[in-house]
Image (spheres, rainbow, N blue to C red):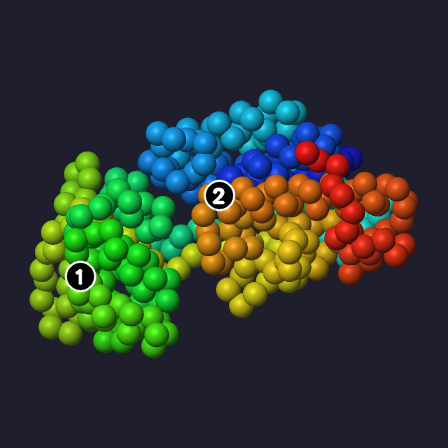
Amino acid sequence: MTPEHVHCLIIGSGPAGYTAAIYASRANLHPVLYQGGQPGGQLTITTEVDNFPGYPEGVQGPQMMQDLETQARRFGTDVRYGLVTKVEFTENPGPGRPHRVWVDDTHEITADSVIISTGASAKWLGLPSEMRLNGHGVSACAVCDGFFFRNQDVAIVGAGDTAAEEASYLSNLCRKVYMIVRRGEMRASRFMQARIKAKENIEILWHTDTLEILGDNGVTGARLKNTQTGEEHVIDVTGFFVAIGHKPNTDIFKGYVTLDDHGYILTEKGSTRTNVPGVFACGDAQDNIYRQAITAAGTGCMAALDAERYLVTLEMQGEPVSANGVVAGVDLAVGEPVIS
């Protein structure tokens, strides 16, 4: 079958993908967006979202993603179900040399520009109770959800800098924070460890595994086991946070775009451009620091602006873009974007 050709292809939904779609649609780039394996991204498994501007009373995560999708469709985005399973990015794209993408291993698409917004997935402990109570007291983002546990007792699992930072953040909101560490030492930096140990309301539980998170409709506690003695005990908590890392959903792009040691896509400073001309990355797929809905949306806007500038310049010059983002001496990083 003849491949379908699109001007702007957006891989993945969520705040980054839908924001990119809104801006790309308004620039008449006629974007096609494939939602991926989890339409709407991680926010679809989040309950209350209180920190996204424009929702003064807060909003349910799934509802916010539905609002963003509706807005993207309103401006003409072709939103589709489907999972991109393979890509072949062209190092030197131009007329007759588009990027190639396959959806669900069968449908081939050629694209003049590609925006990657595949996000990152939180790593979980793998407990059935953890999945059952996800969004009902179990969370992988203390910054997102810590507010709901003010003056309550909570637990957090993890031993790295992220876990230490989130434990410190929670200690400013919560009455008591149990930090569950499997070994007898932490991976966090010495500075972060000293910061944690200085907090009077943080108790570190060394050599401890989580066996079960307790509760029916919400978290009421956690059953723990000391890995040295085998002794089990229960802590009474109303919130349980998992901070053992995230995995960016970028495996299919290996060998084409440059990734860091943890799999996050590297973009040029101050832009969303990857090392491949015409391929842009936004949201948590390239952000291992902030990982917030609002920052993802911001980079989605940037990706659409970068893609629009790239396509307009490419059409004006009628020449392929070099690897350093220059067309006939024109730097794509300069010039005013058309989108408003």
Q: Earlier in the sequence, mark 2 or mark 1?
A: 1
Residue 7, how many percent across, how many down? 75, 37
Taking the spot 14% from the left edge, 45% from the top edge, the residue there is 220
Q: Is residue 223 left or right of residue 33?
A: left
Query: Which residue bears the numbered disc 1?
Result: 201
Residue 24, how many percent across, how many down? 67, 35
Q: Nearer the viewer, residue 186 or 53?
A: 53
Where, by quadrant of the figure, is residue 61 drawn?
Answer: top left
Asked if one can make out residue 323 in the rendered structure from this viewpoint, the answer is yes
Local packing at callout 2 (Cα closer than 10 Å; few below 14, some 14-19, many 20+) is: some
Residue extending furthest toward the top: 74
Q: Is residue 157 above or below residue 136?
A: below
Q: Is residue 175 above or below residue 184?
A: above
Q: Nearer the viewer, residue 155 or 129?
A: 155
Q: Is residue 248 left or right of residue 198?
A: right
Quarter of the N terminus within the rendering: top right
Amino acid on which disc 2 is placed: Ile
Query: Which residue bears the numbered disc 2?
Result: 294
Amino acid on which disc 1 is placed: Asn
Residue 260, how many percent across, how many down? 56, 65
Taking the spot 68% from the left edge, 34% from the top edge, the residue there is 340
Q: Is residue 255 above or below residue 55?
A: below
